[in-house]
Image (tube, rainbow, N blue to C red):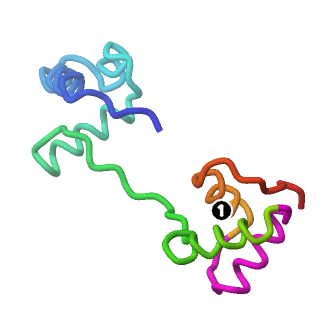
Amino acid sequence: MPRPYSVDLRERAVAAFRRGGRTLEEVAAEFSVCDKTLSHWLKLEAETGRLEPRPRGGGHFSPIQGEVLETLGRQVRMRPDATVQEHFEALVARTQVHTSRSAVIRALRRQGPAEVSDDS
């Protein structure tokens, strides 16, 4: 995701709109932002009294952490020639974790170079 616009830019754009005499679209164009962005800033200021960007939301966190990750690591050490699909199936069977094959690939990459075939 791109970084939020600076508070300085937000303040200048909102102040320019509040001075009046121009439409939201004209002020947004002057500051090279979308008119919906300027509208959002006005709403944000009305709701919070501030123009600082709201904190970013969390994301989806991998269930392959802690003991589950250790189990995956043991599997790889025991069967380094197994495919990702085989590791995925074994991990789900052993831990009952709800995950995906691609999550297993990402977990393996986070752990560094591993001798795991990406074959299905």
Circle 1 packing at 10 Å, graded few (<14), some (14-19), many (20+), is some
Residue 64 x, y percent position in the rendering:
57, 69
* In magenta stretch: residue 94: yes
Q: Is residue 63 left or right of residue 118?
A: left
Q: Is residue 56 above or below residue 62?
A: above
Span of residues in magenta: 81-99
| Three-letter amino acid code of the residue under disc 1 | Ala
Looking at this view, is 115 or 5 the one in front? 115
Q: Is residue 1 left or right of residue 117?
A: left
Q: Is residue 27 above or below residue 108?
A: above
Residue 51 x, y percent position in the rendering:
18, 38
Residue 24 x, y percent position in the rendering:
30, 26
* In magenta stretch: residue 108: no
Which residue lies under the disc numbered 1?
103
Q: Residue at x 17, y 51 (%)?
A: 47
- The quadrant holding residue 8 is top left
Q: Residue at x 28, y 50 (%)?
A: 55
